Amino acid sequence: MKLFRKKRVLMLLFMTFVLLLFFNSNWMSWFYPIHYKEEIQLQAEEYELDPFLIAAIIRVESNFKPGKESSKGALGIMQLMPRTATWAMEMARIPEVSLDRIKHEVGPNIQLGAWYFASLSKQFDGNRTLAIAAYNAGPGNVRSWMDKGLWDGQLETVKEIPIDETRHYVQRVLYYYDKYTDIYDEF
């Protein structure tokens, strides 16, 4: 008798879950949330970037968790290296903020990360795949791979990126970008 009740309760819970999914057209957003939408949107507009792409980079870099510092020293939710952040503040003429603020505060981190990604995108003539790879490996490394014929920078040949970490990084950013653009009608 107890087993029968447990099955009924489990079946009722399952049916409730299925109904919630059915009536909530945006249920996938539960699994692929985007945090800090206002900050991302603001910087995406400022630097003429796709906000879903910035969100995908943040998802891969830190899963939207501020205050992170990588083992290599990258800071904040967009995982900026201190030298890159300092250079970006100087080049973009953004008022200088401390590295501690870049690490812990979402706004300055997204601003610098978005500016840097826009800079990479310009360097690579708008080639999104090259810019994503350069965000991870650095523009010098990406140019070197291209000059040596190791990778042609095309989306279709991402599997030829010679560094595993960067190859997986690009694949993951593009995966989340595709998920976000499939799930969300607008940013």
Image (spheres, rainbow, N blue to C red):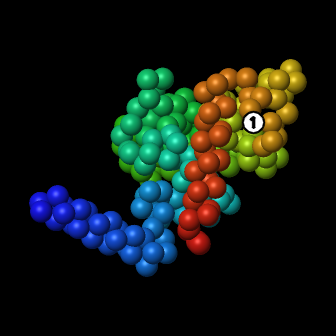
Quarter of the image where one finds residue 165 = top right
- Disc 1, SS: helix
Residue sitting at the far bottom:
23
| Badge 1 density bin: few <14, some 14–19, many ≥20, Cα 10 Å | some
Confirm whether residue 126 shows in the render.
yes
Residue 174 percent across, percent down from the top left: 65, 47
Answer above or below: position of 147 versus 45.
above
Quarter of the image where one finds residue 139 = top right
Q: For the image shown, how many numbered marks are present on the structure?
A: 1
| Residue positioned 64% across, 25% down in the render | 164
| Residue positioned 59% across, 57% down in the render | 179
Residue type indicated by callout 1: Val
Residue named by callout 1: 158
Residue 122 percent across, percent down from the top left: 76, 47
Confirm whether residue 47 shows in the render.
no
Residue 5 percent across, percent down from the top left: 16, 65
Q: Nearer the viewer, residue 130 or 95?
A: 130
| Residue positioned 74% across, 47% down in the render | 128
Q: Quadrant of the N terminus?
A: bottom left
Quarter of the image where one finds residue 168 = top right
Answer above or below: position of 40 versus 57.
below
Residue sitting at the far front:
1
Residue 39 percent across, percent down from the top left: 48, 60
| Residue positioned 78% across, 43% down in the render | 155
Q: Which of 171 and 140 is in front in this view?
A: 171
